[in-house]
Image: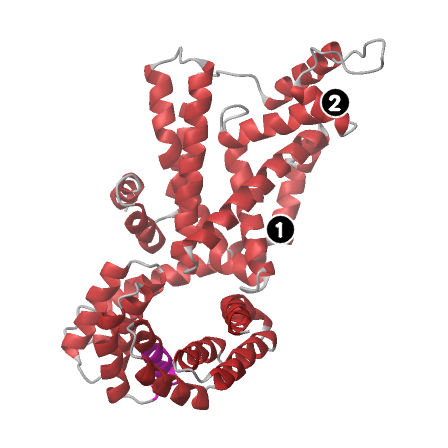
Amino acid sequence: MIGENFKSLFLLYAKPVAAIGRILDAGTVWFAVVAALIVSLLVHAPQRGLSIEERVAIGAAADEAISDEDASGRLAPAASSATRFGRALGRPGLASIAFSAAGEWTGAEGGSFATLGAVALAFLPLLIAVRAIAGFGSFGVLMRSEYLSLLMCSLSAWAAAYLPIALIEWAAPELPAMVALVLFALANIYFLALTALSVRTLTGSGLAFAAGLVALSAVGAIVGLTVYAFVGSMRYYLLSPFLLFYGYRLFFSDVRALGDGLRSRQHLRRQLEIATNNPRDADAHYQLGLIYQKRRQFTEALARFERAIAIDKTEADPHLQLGRIALEQNRFTDAIPYLETAAKLDDKASASEVWRDLGAAYLGAGRIPEAAQALEKYASRRPYDPEGLYHCGKALAALGRNAEAKERFTECIEAVKTAPGHRKSQVRKWAGQAQSALRDMK
């Protein structure tokens, strides 16, 4: 088990997406925590700088010393940019604290565990909160299903990102301060990139959305560290063993529930792997393919779906998913045979979505009449699906049937407006594209 965890950790340097998949499937939280703590201790062992409290105190004293006003009432020319920014906000030491908090987030200053605490207590909860606000589920449900998985991945990513820093610092203890600052900044960027890949792999969201989510959460973590510094000595009371124990007992059931999502996910994966030992179990391969597909590990997903077809050629779903992967990769010509086969095997595969996907493939391949026919058939069965209505409108517009196309685009926009809250975040883009298409037709 430990050996597998080490392999996954070092695989992050070569094949990050595959490594994240392995961490989610077989990783352990305790290993990620211990690895991050050890790397953090190694990074801060040389004790290069002062603690954030000392830096804030020195920065505030320096601000006071150099911010004397001249005879005209203006700041002295020697005043630092931090002093000027802080004075503009009515708090001369504020900029020093904020800049120190940013340095603490990157790991360039502060205690050994400050950044890891910010990741666990501010960065990840904020990331999940933003997902909840975006309509992907309630905060409580997302915390229970995703928090521990994200914590395991992010701490592993942090250990991988900062391990080279630790090795460099021990090899070159007299590293110039500016060089060290650049290295810490690069390590933090790499950590955020790996975390964005983890979010995409776990949730199946697009990479751009995952990257924006991670960037916003990083800013929130820096704000949290700034507030933490402002709290001053009060934080030691808030983190007293008595209050921590009382809080644990009060929220015991909620804390235990944080691991439910990770445990059930890993248990399902193990059971499916065991089931694939049965040479006639096509469904086990199909279900594993769906897991890989959601994580955008398409090579592994393709292999599983093809294996499921080899075992049972009469099942429509593996053909459908192979077509969807080709469709997502804009390989429209490759997608069409898979989707046609799925439609022949099951006219109502995936709640008739096979006709929507087949129509989209025809549309992408330039086979417009066939696209319109497939999409109109789907729209008659599923008249409230925004994606199907949008593609149908595109096909009708390409045929010059503008009045019908406008009607479909309008129905698409209305379908998004009336969609349930948890689904709006998934279909909102079709309304935007339909509005753009309507503007182009005027």
Viewer can see residue 152: no
Question: How are the residues colored?
Answer: secondary structure
Q: Which residue is mark 2?
A: 92
> Looking at the picture, does residue 102 appear above or below residue 360?
above
Task: Give yes or no for residue 354 being in the magenta stretch.
Answer: yes
Counting from the top left corner in percent of width and height, residue 340 is at 25, 82
Closer to the chain start, of discs 1 and 2, is: 2
> Looking at the picture, does residue 100 appear above or below residue 191?
above
Counting from the top left corner in percent of width and height, residue 442 is at 55, 74
Cβ atoms at labels 1 and 2 below 8 Å apart:
no
Residue 383 image label:
none
Amino acid on which disc 2 is placed: Pro
Counting from the top left corner in percent of width and height, residue 351 is at 39, 84
Q: Residue at x 47, y 80 (%)?
A: 389
Task: Give yes or no for residue 409 being in the magenta stretch.
Answer: no
Q: Residues within 10 Å of mark 1 (few under 14, many from 20)?
A: few
Q: CA distance from mark 1 to mark 2?
A: 41 Å
Q: Residues within 10 Å of mark 2 (few under 14, many from 20)?
A: many
Q: Which residue is mark 1?
A: 249
Viewer can see residue 153: yes
Amino acid on which disc 1 is placed: Arg
Of 419 and 249, the residue lying toward us: 419
Of 21 and 328, the residue lying toward us: 328
Counting from the top left corner in percent of width and height, residue 6 is at 28, 40
Report the mark closest to the observer, 1 or 2: 2
Q: Which residues are magenta?
A: 348-359
> Looking at the picture, does residue 58 appear above or below residue 148?
above
Q: Residue at x 38, y 25 (%)?
A: 165
Q: Residue at x 41, y 42 (%)?
A: 193
Query: Tag 2, which secondary structure?
Result: loop
Quarter of image, res 40? top left
Query: Tag 1, which secondary structure?
Result: helix
